[in-house]
Image (cartoon, grey):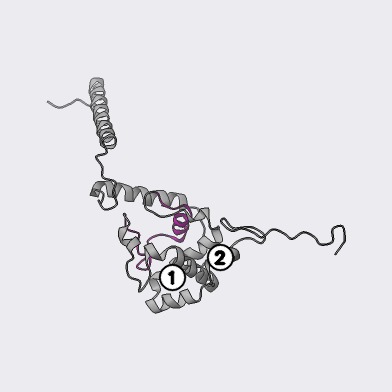
């Protein structure tokens, strides 16, 4: 005998069944967490359903938050790409690798594995900017926006978008064209007179002739 979906009691029964199912699911999740049953170790992969849920959560979260981000018009500027090459090499290549680079101890130990950005571009420029600036929870992807301004982050985006087209020789040439060191890039990327995070500005020297016009 089937349920008459037009009857109020049927509606109440469905609500009760769904409520009981939700309660059981919540209890199961609570027990799993409380008893430490889920292995959080990076060498124990998620189950397929858990991985799929987390992957969808990540992709949709980035997509929604990056929807209104507009890339600068000069994203293809060689100077911006050169700056990005230096930043990427120092900050990103150990995990995301690059053309001609072997897998590192860091990249092999990460879970989930960091995408090898030189193989393909799966995100829009805006999505890449958001991910680099804000990082991604539980992936070892740092929020570089804590220490680097937007201009430097766009430099990294500019370079990352070039990576899939580069040969190992072209990658090495890009590194050689980068500014001399990280501190130099940090200084050049900041606004005049503004200290970048983590950078100490030298104190202003006192006026040798106070009260005199120059």
Where residue 183 is drawn, which disc sits there?
Answer: 2
Residue 43 makes an appearance in the image: yes
Magenta part of the chain: 112-137
Crowdedness of circle 2 by 10 Å Cα count: few (<14), some, many (20+)? few
**Quadrant, the C terminus:** bottom right
Question: Residue 188, image x and y in percent?
Answer: 60, 66
* Residue closest to the eye, 50 or 59: 50
Residue 5 screen position, x and y as percent: 22, 27
Residue 76 point in image, percent of width and height:
51, 70
Which residue lies at the image location 48% right of the left edge and 64% below the top edge? 156
* Residue 121 seen by the camera: no
Q: Nearer the observer, disc 1 or disc 2? A: 2
User: In screen coordinates, is 157 left or right of 149?
Assistant: left
Query: Horizontally, is 53 left or right of 129 in the view?
Result: left
Identify the residue at image location x=35%, y=74%: 100
Q: Quadrant of the rendered structure where residue 1 is?
A: top left
Q: Are marks 1 and 2 in contact (CB under 8 Å)?
A: no
| Count of numbered labels shown in the rendering | 2
Query: Could you say whether the residue bearing mark 1 is in a helix, strand or loop?
Result: loop
Viewer-closest of 2 and 91: 91
Q: Residue at x 35, y 71 (%)?
A: 101
Residue picked out by circle 1 = 162
Please state if 11 lies on the left or on the right of 135 as rendered.
Answer: left
The residue at the far right in this view is 212
Comes first in the chain, label 1 or label 2: 1
Q: Quadrant of residue 108?
A: bottom left
Specify whether residue 45 is painted magenta. no
The majority secondary structure of the magenta stretch comes to loop
Q: Element under label 2? A: helix
- Considering depth in this image, is 205 or 131 the residue closer to the camera? 205
């Amino acid at each position: 005998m089937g349920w008459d979906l037009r009857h109020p009691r049927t509606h109440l029964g469905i609500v009760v069944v769904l409520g009981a199912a939700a309660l059981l699911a919540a209890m199961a999740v609570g027990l799993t967490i409380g008893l430490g049953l889920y292995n959080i170790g990076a060498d124990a992969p998620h189950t397929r359903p858990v991985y799929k849920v987390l992957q969808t959560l990540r992709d949709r979260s980035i997509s929604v938050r990056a929807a209104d981000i507009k890339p600068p018009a000069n994203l293809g500027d060689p100077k911006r790409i050169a700056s990005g090459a230096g930043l990427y090499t120092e900050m990103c290549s150990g995990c995301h690798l690059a053309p001609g680079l072997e897998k590192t101890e860091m990249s092999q130990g990460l879970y989930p594995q960091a995408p090898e950005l030189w193989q393909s571009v799966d995100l829009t420029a805006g999505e890449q900017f958001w991910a680099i600036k804000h990082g991604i929870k539980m992936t070892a992807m740092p929020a570089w926006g804590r220490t680097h301004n937007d201009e430097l982050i766009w430099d990294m985006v500019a370079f990352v978008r070039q990576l899939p087209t580069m040969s190992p020789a072209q990658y090495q040439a890009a590194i050689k064209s980068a500014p001399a060191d990280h501190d130099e890039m940090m200084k050049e990327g900041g606004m005049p007179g503004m200290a970048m995070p983590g950078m100490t500005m030298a104190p202003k020297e006192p006026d040798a002739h106070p009260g005199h016009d120059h």
